[in-house]
Image (cartoon, rainbow, N blue to C red):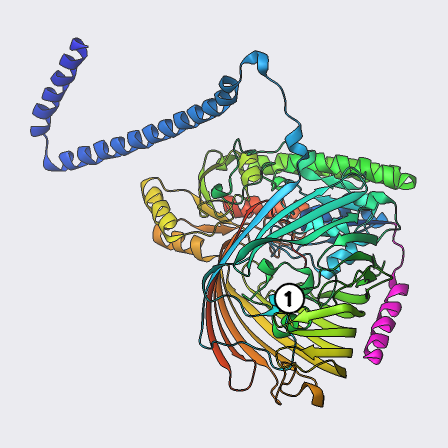
Amino acid sequence: MLKTKLAASAALVTCLFSTSALAASDVEALRAEIQEMKQAYEGRIADLEAALAKVEETQKKIKQPVSATPATAQRTIFDNSFNPSIGVILSGKYSSFSSDDSEIAGFGIGEEGERGREGLALDESELNFTASVDDKFFGHITAAIVREGGEDKVELEESYFQTLAGFGLPDGLSIKAGRAFWTLGYLNEHHSHYGDFTDRPLPYRAFLNKSFNDDGVEASYVLPTDIYAEVGGGVFRGDDFPFGGGDGEGIGAWSAFARIGDDIGDNQSWRLGGYVLSGKAKGGRSSNEDAVSFIGDSDLYVADLRYTWAPTGSAREREVIFQGEYFWRNENGIYEDTNVATGAVNFDDSSSGWYAQTVYKFDPQWRVGARYSQLKAPNVPVGLAGSALDSFGHDPKSYAAMLDWTNSEFSRVRLQYNREELAQGQDDNQVVLQYIMSIGAHGAHKY
Amino acid sequence: MKRFLGIFVATLLSAIPLAAQAEVNIFACEPEWAALAEEIGGNKVETFSATHANQDPHYIRARPSLIAKMRKANVLLCSGAGLEAGWLPLLLQKAGGEVQPGAVGHLMATDVVPVLEKPVTIDRSQGDVHPQGNPHVHLNPHNVLLVAKELTTRLGKIDAGNAYFYISRYQDFFARWQKAITNWEAKAFALKGKPVVVHHKSFVYLLDWLGIQEVAALEPKPGISPTTSHLESLLRQMKNKPASLVLRTPYDPDDASQWLSKKTGIPVVVLPYTVGGDARSGNLFSLFGRTISLMTGIYDDQH
């Protein structure tokens, strides 16, 4: 050690002496050379350090599990690989409303169709479990934890099984049974976190209480055609909005649908659908905080269109999505509004609603969107004048504009402005800031 | 309303007679596998590619047209390892038994080639990592050959009457491909050990094959778009130890690579990545020929 030190200082001294004898240009050259050598060495040292760190890291990783369990106790745990994939959606909002009221004129609105809570508030927190049951069945359950009436409640949104190809039905035919967001329009099949806006458009709030997920069975068949074509239908208990109080006797409600879709060139695609949902609100559909009830037949017809276009070819970079749905409902039964003591009033009329929206992704992480939705209230019978079902000639409408930022597939933050003109003289300007995060397994989304 | 439904049903019915029976329908998730299926299957197969060269196969939608195509497929040929996880499961739910996992008609390239970059630990804070390893396997031509062989076997089972046809196509492909590999490797020899920067980890297999060193990625973590701070640190790294090239695919956004190139003078090369990725990459052979020409800067043949 001492020897090397001596040698080094000797070298340094010689170096110093000799350099003084050199010409200035040579000094420059030498300096540059030393600098170069230094850089090269630093680079190499950094490389070595990186390589070493890598080795250490892998060693650590290899070592850890071994040291955690004694050799004799080692066993392979297979159970975990058979666990269903678990996904959790975390979602919350800050909302500010300019109007105290948000009645929708001329319609009986269910609890989930109402405006959200003002201020800081958690949205639905969603738990998803999904797995193939065996070679023949696929199972899924979604539980949402929601705040309702000042309490956190678990809402079973979906719990269904679906047949797989292994079940042996003819190709393209599949059966789904249990509770699910049934095939009806575009948005109904999708969970709320998937939406392009913080809230559902007016027709969904008025006609479906946000979504239709009754208990039932649905069959669908994809036709062996060159363009996409699917037909299907289902039968339901008749318990969920727009029905209610299904007693299980016979079929409470039924549905039928047909869809077609295809691509236009390489970068555009579309889907068009027509749907019927018909049934009886036997025990009564209650709305407006149980003040308004309807008993009778309710037929709902829906048409939807969705069109997507990726101008550069890559939808990840830029994309335009257009989407619109039209709802038409015919009701024949008895309405009653206990708030104004209308008594039972015969009702036989139709109402309708629609929305159209466009979302434009102008950057891989940023999107803007605009939506317009509108309802057309039914003519109110004399007996219901002055009740919640009396629109006073006002057709509810709502405008929305949003901007959202998507960090990865798993996180999104959205700012939305709404102007809702839902009843005469009740203009509501709303600002909503929302976050949506997804942890764990996250299933693929439908078109 | 009734009239509307009537038109609807009429449209559906008119679509049915179009469903002519092709011999073997191959649904390829990516263009490179569609090209390979054509090499082996020739005129005995009908191939369809779910994505084109400008699309990132991670991020396409389960479009209605894909459901229709998958419904009729006899063979599914994809990269696998989670690359198509965002849309393939939905298509499989509506597909027939022939292409379901475990069936002869379900072929994932990552199941038959050695997969690189299998992570030891997985957490989403590391970005969009694929637990089963890097799925972009096709840019090593040796892997292509392995998949070709497996595809030949599967096609022989599904369409036994034409088994010899497929085998002879494979033998022909094998001979031409081996010769081409020798050529490419000779041409790319000068690239060995060269440091490069990539946009996304799309070229791991290409670089591994040619012995090129990937020193950095523009994405701070796989699937996370480049950030200013990450690019700044890359710039410092490049000033210290410049890379030879910046590589990206046609579907990666160009701003980050352009920025780095402008600041450092390191040239950006847009590699075709897959068949159809540029005008001169019309088939598998020209894809590799073109890729190597672009990286070496030597354009001495028709590719």
Residue appearing at x 74%, y 35% in the figure: B175
Residue B20 painted magenta: yes
Q: Is residue B198 left or right of residue A161?
A: left
Left or right: A138 as drawn, with respect to A411: right
Quadrant of the image containing the N terminus of chain A: top left
Magenta-drawn stretch contains B208: no
Name the residue beneath numbered marker 1: A210
Residue B23 drawn at (x, y percent): 88, 50
Q: Name the image quarter holding the C terminus of chain A.
A: bottom right
Most common secondary structure along the magenta stretch: helix
Q: Residue furthest right?
A: B161
Q: Vertical placement of A87 versus A118: above or below?
A: above
Q: Residue at x 70, y 73 (%)?
A: A293
Q: Position of residue A141 (x, y in %)?
A: 68, 48
In x, y percent, where is residue A146? 56, 56
B287 vs A290, nearest the viewer? A290
**Residue in the image at 67% along x and 83% along y:** A377
For the point 22% across and 34% down, the residue is A35
Range drawn in magenta: B1-23
Packing grade of label 1 (10 A; few <14, some 14-19, many >=20) is: many
Q: Amino acid at mark 1?
A: Lys
Q: Is residue A357 above or below residue B183?
A: below
Q: Compared with residue B163, is residue A185 higher up or lower down, i.e. above or below?
A: below
**Looking at the image, can residue A24 be seen?**
yes
The reply to whether residue A21 is in sight is no
How many badges with numbers are in the image?
Answer: 1
Under circle 1, the secondary element is: loop
Q: Chain of mark 1?
A: A
Residue A174 versus residue A432: which sits nearer the camera? A432
- State the image coordinates of residue A88 (x, y, percent, origin top left): 57, 48
User: In the depicted view, which residue is nearer to us: A4 or B126?
Assistant: B126
